[in-house]
Structures are given as structure tokens and as C-alpha cells.
């Protein structure tokens, strides 16, 4: 595994930045916070200097780091009991109010359900890939996806059964 020199880090950054930004935007729901969290995830990469086997492992490592950075930031907001400005209003209005409502419901899910939904539906991972990223068994991921869908149907006024 080559050392993290400037050139290697630059390659990793260029290859993964758009993906990691999408992960952070899915959590933070606004561009400025997503950009901050994206950069923090890459700083964690520099600090940790993990042994990355290939590009897939690189992306998985950064995805988990980005998710952790976002959760940490959201937790700090809750602890301070401050409510960030209405983040849903800052979402692009491409698909209208229904898309915003679904995304808000996803973001209100408990972490273990939100993580699998974001990775699977918003970021396009397959369930086996989600399992690798989260270090869970594939059956656990599929069970959490099913439970998340039930919760979302209930939260969005559909039949929870």
C-alpha cells in the first residue's frame, strides 16, 4: 500500500469527493453543512491513514467516515438544543413536496434504519454492499430495510402492514 503522499491523496479525493458529498447531503440536507462534513471525512482519512486495499474499500471507508461525521454533527446540534434553520426548505424542489416529505420521514428514522435506507435507496448500494459498509450481515440489512419501509409507510400515512 503506497504512502498517503499529496498525489495519492489528491487521486483519492478526486475519485470520491462527489460520492461523499452526496452521502453528506443526504444526511445534512443543505449544501454548506454537507460541504463541511465532506471535508471532515477526508481529514479523518488523512488522520487515520488506513490501509486501503482497492477503490471499493476506499469508498466504503470514506462512506462510513462521512456518515459518522454527519451523525456527530447532528448529535451536537441536538445536545445544544438548537434547531438549525428549516433544512427542508433548502432542498432542491425538483420532485416537489412529496419528495421533501419522504426525505424528512427518512431523516426522522432511528440511525440503524436511516443508514440502510440512505445507502440503499439514495446512494444506490446493493444490500450486500450495504452490509459490507456497515459491517452487518446481509440478512440484518434486509431486515432493517423491511422494518424501515414499514415505519415509513406508517409515518407517511400508508398501510403499515
Image (cartoon, rainbow, N blue to C red):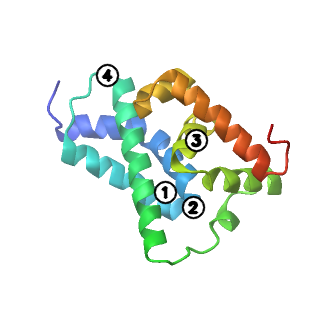
Separation of marks 4 and 3 at Cα, in angstroms? 23 Å
Q: How many marks?
A: 4
Foreground: 4 or 106? 106
Visible residue check, residue 107: yes
Asked whether, in this view, residue 4 is left or right of residue 116, the answer is left
Secondary structure of the residue carrying numbered label 4: loop
Q: Splitting the image into 4 quarters, where does residue 3 fall?
A: top left
Q: Which dot marks residue 54? A: 4
Check the image and report above or below for 41 versus 2. below
Q: Residue at x 57, y 45 (%)?
A: 114
Q: Which dot marks residue 30? A: 2
Q: Residue at x 17, y 24 (%)?
A: 1
Separation of marks 1 and 3 at Cα, in angstroms? 14 Å
Mark 2 or 3: the one toward you: 3
Q: Reading the chain from its start, which is encountered first: label 1 or label 3?
A: 1
Foreground: 126 or 78? 78
What is the x, y in percent for residue 76? 41, 68
Q: What is the crowding at mark 2: few (fewer than 14 residues within 10 Å), some, or many (at least 20)?
A: some
- Position of the C terminus, as image quadrant, is top right
Mark 1 or 3: the one toward you: 3
Q: Reading the chain from its start, which is encountered first: label 2 or label 3?
A: 2
Foreground: 66 or 133? 133
Separation of marks 1 and 2 at Cα, in angstroms? 6 Å
What is the x, y in percent for residue 84? 55, 73
Foreground: 138 or 89? 138
Q: Which residue is mark 1?
A: 34
Cβ atoms at labels 1 and 2 below 8 Å apart: yes
Q: What is the crowding at mark 4: few (fewer than 14 residues within 10 Å), some, or many (at least 20)?
A: few
What is the x, y in percent for residue 82? 51, 78
Check the image and report above or below for 156 versus 19. below
Secondary structure of the residue carrying numbered label 3: helix
Amino acid at each position: 500500500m503506497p504512502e498517503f503522499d499529496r498525489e495519492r491523496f489528491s487521486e483519492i479525493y478526486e475519485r470520491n469527493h462527489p460520492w461523499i458529498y452526496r452521502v453528506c447531503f443526504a444526511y445534512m440536507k443543505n449544501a454548506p453543512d454537507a460541504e463541511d462534513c465532506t471535508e471532515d471525512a477526508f481529514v479523518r482519512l488523512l488522520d487515520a491513514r488506513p490501509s486501503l486495499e482497492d477503490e471499493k474499500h476506499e469508498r466504503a471507508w470514506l462512506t462510513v467516515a462521512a456518515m459518522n461525521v454527519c451523525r456527530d454533527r447532528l448529535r451536537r446540534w441536538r445536545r445544544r438544543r438548537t434547531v438549525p434553520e428549516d433544512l427542508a426548505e433548502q432542498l432542491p424542489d425538483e420532485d416537489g413536496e412529496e419528495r421533501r416529505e419522504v426525505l424528512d420521514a427518512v431523516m426522522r428514522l432511528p440511525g440503524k434504519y436511516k443508514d440502510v435506507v440512505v445507502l440503499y435507496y439514495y446512494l444506490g448500494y446493493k444490500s450486500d454492499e450495504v452490509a459490507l459498509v456497515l459491517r452487518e450481515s446481509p440478512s440484518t440489512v434486509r431486515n432493517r430495510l423491511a422494518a424501515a419501509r414499514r415505519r415509513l409507510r406508517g409515518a407517511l400515512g400508508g398501510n403499515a402492514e
